[in-house]
C-alpha cells in the first residue's frame, strides 16, 4: 500500500485534532483557512487512507483506578517473536506492544499497583522468553501529535460531541453530522437557503 500524500493543511488538521480531538470542524476550518465542509471532507479522506484509524477515548487508568504504568522489555526465544507478541496483545492491562528492529518486545501496561510482580509472571507468556526486565514508569506523558488523531464527531451546527444516536445528512453535497434533529433542521435552513436571509 502506498503512503498517502499529506499537504501542510492535512498535517495542521491532524495536529489540531491530536491536540484536542473534540475541536469542532468550524474551529479547525478557521485555523486552516478552509470551510467546515472542506475540513470534513479532508478528515473523511484521511480516514479512508487509514491515516486516521479510529475515533476513541484515550483513558489514563492510573488517574482513577489504583493502577501504575510499567514497561516490560522481553527478549523472545529465537523464532518466537511473532507468536509471543500475539499472546501479549491478549494479556490483561496491556496498552501498547512494540517490536524493535532487533526482535525485542517492549510492552507498556497499567496493571493494578498491588500486583505488578504477579501480573508479569501470571499474565505474560514467559516460557518463550530468554530474558525480561520490568520497569515502573514514574510518568507517561504523550505529546499532542504522538497521541494520534483520535477524535470524536461533533455536530456541524452546535459543535457538541455526537453520540451513537447522531444523524448524518448530505447538505449542499457534503456529508454533515448532527447531534439531533433540531440542529440538522437549523443547519439545513442556514446552508440550503442562504439567499432568503
Image (cartoon, grey):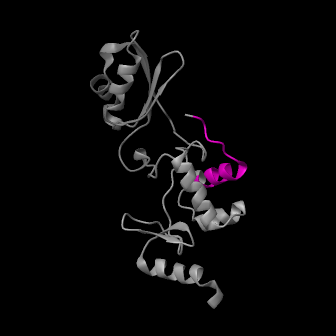
Residue 31 location, quadrant: bottom right
- Which residues make up the magenta segment? 2-17
Residue 180 spot, x, y in % from top left: 42, 75
Q: Which residue is at the front of the view, 88 or 136?
A: 88
Q: Does residue 38 show up magenta in the picture?
A: no
Question: In the picture provided, is 103 more to the left or to the right than 6?
Answer: left
Q: Is residue 88 above or below residue 158?
A: above
Residue 177 spot, x, y in % from top left: 48, 67
Residue 196 spot, x, y in % from top left: 62, 90
| Quadrant assignment for the N terminus | top right
Q: Which residue is at the front of the view, 31 or 39?
A: 39
Q: Is residue 175 visible?
A: yes
Residue in the picture at 52% in, 15% down: 102
Residue in the picture at 36% in, 67% down: 165
Residue 33 location, quadrant: bottom right
Q: Does residue 11 show up magenta in the picture?
A: yes
Q: Main secondary structure of the magenta part?
A: helix
Q: Which residue is at the front of the view, 116 or 57?
A: 57
Amino acid at each position: 500500500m502506498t503512503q498517502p500524500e499529506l499537504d501542510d493543511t492535512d498535517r495542521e488538521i491532524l495536529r489540531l485534532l491530536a491536540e484536542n480531538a473534540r475541536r469542532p470542524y468550524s474551529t479547525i476550518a478557521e485555523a486552516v483557512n478552509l470551510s467546515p465542509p472542506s475540513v470534513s471532507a479532508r478528515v473523511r479522506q484521511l480516514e479512508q487512507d487509514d491515516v486516521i484509524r479510529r475515533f476513541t477515548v484515550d483513558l489514563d487508568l492510573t488517574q482513577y483506578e489504583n493502577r501504575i504504568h510499567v514497561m516490560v522489555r522481553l527478549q523472545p526465544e529465537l523464532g518466537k517473536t511473532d507468536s509471543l507478541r500475539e499472546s501479549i496483545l491478549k494479556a490483561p492491562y496491556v496498552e501498547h506492544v512494540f517490536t524493535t528492529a532487533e526482535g525485542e518486545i517492549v510492552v507498556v501496561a497499567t496493571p493494578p499497583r498491588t500486583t505488578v510482580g504477579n501480573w508479569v509472571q501470571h499474565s505474560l507468556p514467559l516460557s518463550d522468553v530468554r530474558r525480561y526486565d520490568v520497569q515502573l514508569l514514574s510518568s507517561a506523558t504523550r505529546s499532542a501529535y504522538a497521541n494520534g488523531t483520535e477524535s470524536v464527531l461533533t455536530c456541524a451546527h452546535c459543535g457538541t460531541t455526537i453520540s451513537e444516536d447522531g444523524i448524518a445528512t448530505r447538505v449542499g453535497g457534503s456529508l454533515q453530522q448532527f447531534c439531533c434533529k433540531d440542529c440538522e433542521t437549523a443547519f439545513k435552513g442556514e446552508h440550503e437557503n442562504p439567499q432568503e436571509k
